[in-house]
Amino acid sequence: MAAIGVGYAEATEAVEIAPGSGTAGRAVAFDEVLIDHMVRSSPHGDRILDGTLRPLLDYDAERQAELVATLRAYVEAAFNLTKSAEKLSVHPNTVVYRLRRIKELSGRDPHDPEDLLLLFLGLKLTELSS
């Protein structure tokens, strides 16, 4: 009987999270939004955001830059510079420059797995809050 309650709670959570994670128009399993759920329910969300994407969001807003979009493209392209550049319609050197700027502004290196994980979680937080 408890499993029904857990299943219902997970289904409800998946329905709430799916639009923010870009999933729409189809059934969503809780496992598909598990990372989103973990980030969303973490008491450290603001700390993660402040330590990763907030400086980038501020920089982008002040200078009409695309550091966050570049980071998102880099992640979505499985960390491939050429594919990231194609997705953004820029030269690969532009992506390299922007990734370097991301490191300078956030203190997190997009080429370091642990830093990249925190940057990714910051991206998740911004997606869930939009």
Image: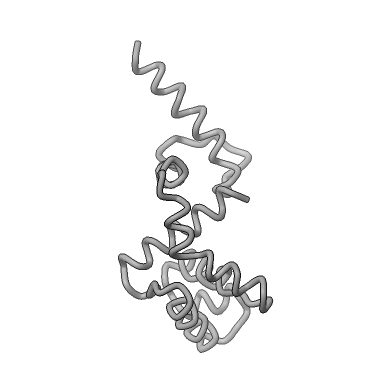
Answer above or below: position of 111 versus 10.
below
Residue 103 percent across, percent down from the top left: 43, 78
Given residues 61 and 26, the one toward you in this image is 61
Q: How is the image coloured?
A: one colour
> Furthest residue to the top?
1
Q: How many marks?
A: 0
Q: Residue at x 42, y 71 (%)?
A: 79
When asked about the image quadrant of residue 94, the answer is bottom right
Q: Is residue 110 above or below residue 122?
A: below
Figure quadrant of residue 64: bottom right
Q: Position of residue 90 (x, y in %)?
A: 60, 83
> Which quarter of the picture shows residue 43?
top left
Up-down relation of residue 118 to residue 112 (above or below): above
Residue 59 percent coordinates (x, y) = 60, 74
> Residue at horizontal 49%, vertical 81%?
101
Residue 15, compared with residue 78, is above or below; it is: above
The quarter of the rendered structure image containing the N terminus is top left
Query: Does residue 117 appear to the left or right of 90 in the view shown?
Result: left
Residue drawn at x 55%, y 55% as measured from the top left: 126
| Picture coordinates of residue 60, whole percent (x, y) | 62, 73
